[in-house]
Image: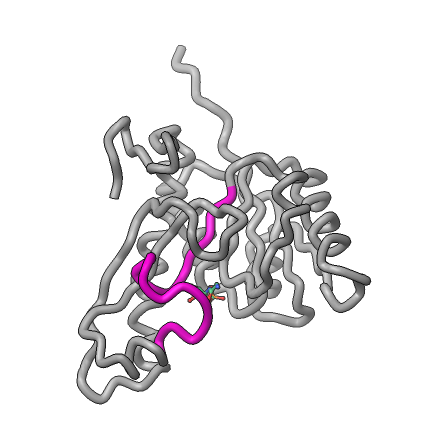
Amino acid sequence: MTKTSPAMRIAVVISGSGSNLQAIIDAVAAGQLNATICCVVSNVPGVHGLTRAAAAGIATELIDHRGFDNREAFDQALCEAAHTHGADVIVLAGFMRILSDEFFKLWTGPMLNIHPSLLPSYPGMNTHERVIADGGRWHGASVHFVIPQLDAGPVIIRGACPVLPRDTAQALANRVHAVEHRIYPQALAWLAAGRLNLSENQVLLDGTRHP
Ligand code: GAR
């Protein structure tokens, strides 16, 4: 009899449309990612990502940051939700808040983020506008482990796309989204299969430096 390992339990944290969440939902449904999405947490009420989660029968939690006295109290509630739902991994998918140092004391498991640029280029906000303003020829997205420094954690996978003449930020964002929907499920599939490791801040895939 073959022993199968239990599916990795993912808490997905969002602030908006949730198209990356949808890509993860679809990858699980297609059998491309051996994981269970145990909950979807949003810090913003009424966002489309919550509707997507409910449509897929996934538990949702609204933790509105405006209801908390400070960042630490919000972060504690977020961490509690992940623990309550038995998450092994926290997956930030368009979550638009900065986590406090407190969060990293409370959550010691893996946490991944997707960022709309080819990190380490263009950390922070408004990446599409900045790449166009700089006349960049290439743009894309990166999935990385989260560390307390913003957008600075070890990169697991990058996906690139061209910047086209006369691109608007929205046109470029759409192209980047298509890349994101491919690379986030891929990174999670590697993690779920136990193929990713960290050694001295360097990502190893099957024991070899990556990307
Ligand atoms: C994505 O492009 C993601 O990379 C970005 O927000 C978008 C969310 O889209 N994340 C950040 O900027 C994090 N700082 P989605 O809600 O459709 O997945």
Q: Residue at x 49, y 32 (%)?
A: 7
State the image coordinates of residue 99 (x, y, percent, origin top left).
61, 54
Q: Is residue 105 left or right of residue 12?
A: right
Q: Nearer the viewer, residue 19 or 134?
A: 134
State the image coordinates of residue 35 (x, y, percent, origin top left).
48, 38
Queried whether the magenta region covers residue 118, the answer comes back as yes
Establish if 171 lies above or below 103: below
Q: Which portion, as a residue range, is magenta?
A: 111-128
Q: Quadrant of the C terminus?
A: top left
Establish if 185 lies above or below 2: below
* Coloring basis for residues: one colour
State the image coordinates of residue 129 (x, y, percent, origin top left).
36, 80
Q: Is residue 161 left or right of residue 55?
A: left
Determine the image quadrant of residue 10. top right
Main SS of residues in magenta: loop
Q: Quadrant of the N terminus?
A: top left
Q: Is residue 169 left or right of residue 97?
A: left
Q: Residue at x 29, y 64 (%)?
A: 140
Q: Nearer the viewer, residue 204 or 49?
A: 204
Queried whether the magenta region covers residue 169, the answer comes back as no
Q: Residue at x 70, y 46 (%)?
A: 81
State the image coordinates of residue 178 (x, y, percent, origin top left).
31, 65
Q: Tell which residue pokes out farthest to the bottom in this image.
A: 166
Q: Nearer the viewer, residue 98 or 93?
A: 98
Q: Residue at x 34, y 64 (%)?
A: 117
